[in-house]
Image: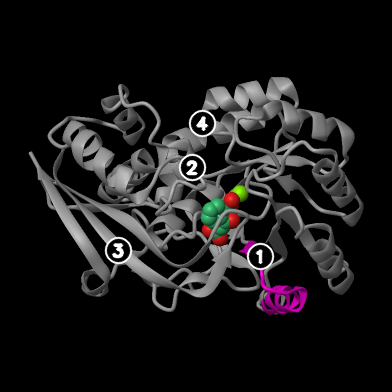
Amino acid sequence: MRVTHASLHLVRLPLVHRFRTSSHAKDHLDHILVRLTDASGAVGWGEIASPTDPFYSPETVDTCWLVAERYLLPSLVGAHWDDPAEVGGLWARVRGHQFAKAGVDIAAWTLWSLSGGVSLATALGGTRSSVVAGVSLGIEPTIDDLLAEVGKHVDAGYPRVKLKIAPGWDVEPVRAVRAAFPDLQLHVDANGVYGESDDEVAALRSLDDHGLSMIEQPFAPRNLLAHAALQRDIETPVCLDESIDTLDDLRTAVVLGALKVLNIKVSRMGGLGPAVAGHDLAAEHDIPVWCGGMHEFGVGRAANVALSSLPGFTLPSDVSASAKYYERDVVLPPITASAGVVEVPTGPGLGHTVDEEFLASVTVRSATIAA
Ligand code: OSB
Ligand code: MG
């Protein structure tokens, strides 16, 4: 297979509901869609779902654009490859920049599966015909606002809710949500903002009493030792997100006892190939995994749905329906969930087509790279 033409499209979509985490708030997202074409004219799409600012990871939309345009696409366009698992080898010299790599990698997988007439899920080794979705809810102005948001998504059928927490917004919202929804599968995500002061560790430890299915990334990404110490002290599983960019990170975290659950994000791990490898490695260590999200547009979320169909994804994934995020998504049909369950498409490739006319109307900037 040979990509003859590639293009990047910076696309802006407004969020239906303002999203606040421990580090920042956002009303719209700017993601970069990657379009690859081969000599037969087949088209594969990918998505670079980096946040605009370097508050989740060191990458930004601007660094992704630069790295994809200057390094990744020039090494891919014109090169011969047989399997998308080889594509990462074309840019092996490029260190880091996982989000940028992931967007190009997803496009290679979708092009290859489409050309081969198989679904992306099948190409990845998926076995499930549907996946269970959860929702991730931001920090709200008041507890009442939060209870209303949780209620709305529970009513829509989502069986699992994740709450963003930060020092000062942790025990109280968790207690309130737990009191109102005693049987809900509930977990929290701190995005690495807790320190190791006695007060902050005590707050995390007291979350152990609320039947949470996990505490996600309480401490800074590189601070595996603090995660291991907390995991020794509490029953609730510690889940890692920002700490795990590579398989080497995962091996180290396992040896240290820093996690009991892994959030696999295609973007954070640098693509679908590395995400599948992370799934396999976690399974060897009996670590259950779920697929995290970055508020992807339909292209990236369809890839997340396909990945979540692998057998080790035994916990609900952040693959909510398009309507949770966007009034209008870039794919047709949009991603839908029924009683919190998303069907895995069986048609070739992504199983969703990109609405190119709508895309043109929301594209801010484009660039092309030809052989
Ligand atoms: O930590 O999982 C996270 C969104 C942006 C940045 C980081 C995270 C998130 C989410 C959203 O939790 C999950 C989703 O896509 O629904
Ligand atoms: Mg997270």
Amino acid identity at mark 2? Ser
> Which span of residues is magenta-colored?
134-152
Q: CA distance from mark 4 to mark 1?
A: 33 Å
Question: Which element type, helix, strand or loop, lies under badge 2?
Answer: loop
For residue 357, what is the image quadrant? Answer: bottom left
Q: Nearer the viewer, residue 353 or 22?
A: 22
The residue located at (81%, 29%) in the rendering is 229
Q: Reading the chain from its start, which is encountered first: label 1 or label 3?
A: 3
The dot on residue 277 is: 4
For residue 171, what is the image quadrant? Answer: bottom right
Q: Closer to the observer: label 4 or label 3?
A: 3
Q: Residues within 10 Å of mark 4 (few under 14, many from 20)?
A: some
Residue under pointer 1 = 139
Is 49 inside the magenta-drawn segment? Answer: no
Q: Nearer the viewer, residue 139 or 156?
A: 139
Amino acid identity at mark 1? Ile
In the shown orientation, is residue 99 left or right of residue 289?
A: left
The dot on residue 285 is: none
Q: Is mark 4 within 8 Å of ligand 2?
A: no
The dot on residue 11 is: 3
Q: Closer to the observer: label 2 or label 4?
A: 2
